[in-house]
Image: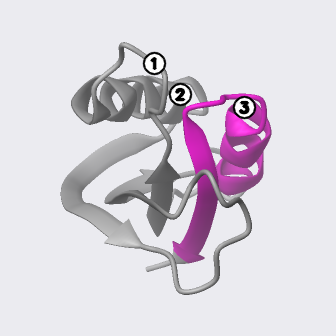
């Protein structure tokens, strides 16, 4: 029996300091990782660069925010977090059920 896919909305904070990658290239990479965890991207919204309310790194006071809506199996968000954990271009990941 095939497991049902669920809808999710992920917010990514992207860090491209010192990298040649543009924000759009990083987003394409994230979309590939979502496909690797058997997910399907339904919408991408680039919010743009925002200042942080609480600064944890004095060298990084703002970053690009991106919302990605996708469908994936129930274990998709955990697998996605694990795959993006070591990606230096993705500063933070927030995933919620939609």
| Residue that lies at the very extreme toward the top in this rendered image | 20
The local crowd at label 3, few if under 14, some if 14 to 19, many if 20 or more residues have their Cα within 10 Å, is some
Check residue 19 in the rendering and tell me which mark sits there, or answer none. Answer: 1
Query: Which numbered disc, 3 or 1, marks the residue closer to the eye?
Result: 1
* Residue at numbered disc 3: 83
Where residue 64 sits, quadrant-wise, is bottom left
**Residue at image point 51% right, 57% down:** 5
Q: Where is residue 15 in the image (x, y as percent from the top left)?
A: 50, 41
* In contact (CB < 8 Å): disc 3 and disc 2: yes
Q: Distance between the residues labelled 2 and 1?
A: 19 Å
**Residue at image point 74% right, 52% down:** 75
Where residue 65 sits, quadrant-wise, is bottom left
Q: Position of residue 72 (x, y in %)?
A: 52, 50
* Residue at numbered disc 2: 33
Relative to 59, residue 7 above or below: below
Relative to 5, residue 19 above or below: above
């Amino acid at each position: 029996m095939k497991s049902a896919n669920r809808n999710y909305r992920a917010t990514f904070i992207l860090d491209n300091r010192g990298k040649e990658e543009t924000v759009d290239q990083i987003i394409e990479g994230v979309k590939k990782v979502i496909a690797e965890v058997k997910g399907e991207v339904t919408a991408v919204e680039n919010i743009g660069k925002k200042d942080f309310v609480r600064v944890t790194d004095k060298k990084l006071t703002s970053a690009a925010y991106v919302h990605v809506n996708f469908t994936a199996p129930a274990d998709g968000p955990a697998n996605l977090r694990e795959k993006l954990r070591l990606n230096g271009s993705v500063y933070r990941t927030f995933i919620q059920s939609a």
